[in-house]
Image: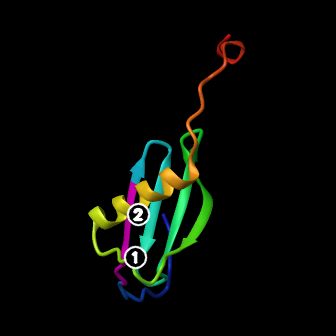
């Protein structure tokens, strides 16, 4: 139990949207206008990159975020075939 002598009940709401696509999580906060890209590592998401959005890229909902995230994946992720020696 946490004990305190005083409690100030100010409540702040956030403006963040996020989506997860495979091992990548994309987080957009309209207060910063940056897209944060995280990658999953052993069940935990870790910071990978912060992307500054172009002035004409607008994210107001999850569909916009999905479009921007998929474009990032197409530009930055290469799917490679696993070698047989790595499979053993």
| Numbered label attached to residue 68 | 2
The answer to whether residue 36 is magenta is no
Q: Position of residue 47 (x, y in %)?
A: 61, 59
* Res 50 quadrant in image: bottom right
| Numbered label attached to residue 65 | none
Q: How is the image coloured?
A: rainbow
Asked if the residues shown at circle 2 and circle 1 are in contact, with their CB atoms under 8 angstroms apart, the answer is yes
**Mark 2, secondary structure of its residue:** helix
- Report which residue position mark 1 lands on: 57
Answer with mark 2 or mark 1, whichever residue precedes in sequence: 1
Q: Residue at x 56, y 47 (%)?
A: 77
Q: Which residue is nearer to you in this view: 81 or 23?
A: 81
Circle 2: is it few (<14), some (14-19), or many (20+) Cα within 10 Å? some
Magenta-highlighted residues: 12-19
* Res 8 quadrant in image: bottom left
Q: Position of residue 80 (x, y in %)?
A: 60, 32
Q: Position of residue 41 (x, y in %)?
A: 60, 43
Q: Is residue 62 left or right of residue 24?
A: left
**Mark 1, secondary structure of its residue:** loop
Q: Residue at x 41, y 63 (%)?
A: 68
Q: Which residue is nearer to you in this view: 56 or 60?
A: 56
Return the residue found at the far top. Answer: 88
Circle 1: is it few (<14), some (14-19), or many (20+) Cα within 10 Å? few
Vertical side of 68 occupied by 85: above or below: above
């Amino acid at each position: 139990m946490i004990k305190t002598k005083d409690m100030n009940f100010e409540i702040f709401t956030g403006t963040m949207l996020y989506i997860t696509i495979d091992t990548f999580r994309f987080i957009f906060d309209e207060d910063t206008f940056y897209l944060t890209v995280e990658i999953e590592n052993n069940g935990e998401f870790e910071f990978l990159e912060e992307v500054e959005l172009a002035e004409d890229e607008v994210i107001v909902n999850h569909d916009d975020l999905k479009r921007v995230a998929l474009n990032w994946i197409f530009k930055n992720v290469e799917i490679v075939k696993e070698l047989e020696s790595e499979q053993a």
